[in-house]
Image: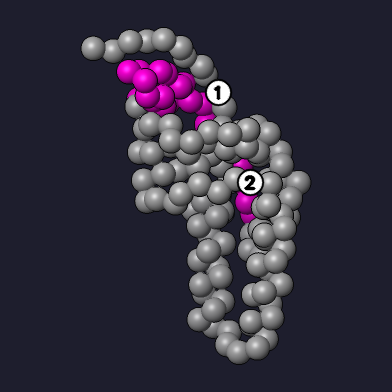
Amino acid sequence: MFYWVKMEKEFYYRYFCGKESIFKKVVKWFDEQTKKKHGKLWAKEYYKLGKQINKSISWLPEYPKGKNIRYYFTKKGAEKYEKTLLKVHKKILQKKIIKKEFEFLIKNIENKKIIFKKKKRIGELVCKDKYQIGIKE
């Protein structure tokens, strides 16, 4: 039995480089560079880029990572990302980064927040703050 208590339609955002999420693409880029470049020169560059990323992302709370969890920025999170970390990501990848908007409906069903996109169930809300949401598929 379902109990429909509260529904909220909201917009969320993700950034992509090609068909991959920007965060996944940056991790792959670092892995490729580590395989290509060796020694002190790469270690120095890696340290410098890591420091820039950490400084630029310090505002974003870190939640558990999982294969079945996707993170989306809130409007405030997207704005903050564009002012900080996006600049570093553009510098690293030197490719076009696109912003995609997602409209979700969040329903409280039996004490769980379930996410829907156009009447299709996407998953369950596992975390939410002012910058992002995490949806377990």
Where residue 90 sits, quadrant-wise, is bottom right
Seen as rendered, the residue at the extreme left is 1
Q: Mark 1: few, some, or many residues within 10 Å (few <14, many ≥20)?
A: few
Query: Are there few (<14), some (14-19), or many (20+) residues within 10 Å of tag 2?
Result: some
- Residue at 41% over, 10% down: 5
Q: Determine the CA span between mark 1 and mark 2.
A: 20 Å
Specify which label sits upstream in the sequence, 1 or 2. 1
Q: How is the image coloured?
A: one colour
Return the residue at label 1.
Answer: 10
Residue 126 sits above or below residue 38 on the image: above
Amino acid of disc 1: Glu
Above or below, 64 against 72 in this view is below
- SS assignment at label 1: strand
User: How far across and down, in percent of the image, does residue 116 sit?
Assistant: 40, 24
Residue 51 horizontal/vertical position (percent): 70, 66
Amino acid type of the residue tagged 2 in the rendering: Leu
x, y percentage for residue 33? Answer: 56, 76
Q: Over which residues does the magenta segment extend?
A: 96-120
Q: Is residue 101 above or below residue 22?
A: above
Query: Taking 118 as reference, is 41 above or below it?
Result: below
Q: Which residue is mark 2?
A: 60
| Foreground of the two, 101 or 57 | 57
Residue found at x 57% / y 27%: 11
Judge left or right: residue 134 versus residue 77. left
Mark sitting on residue 43: none
Question: Which quadrant does the C terminus fall into?
Answer: top left
From this viewpoint, which residue is outermost toward the front?
111
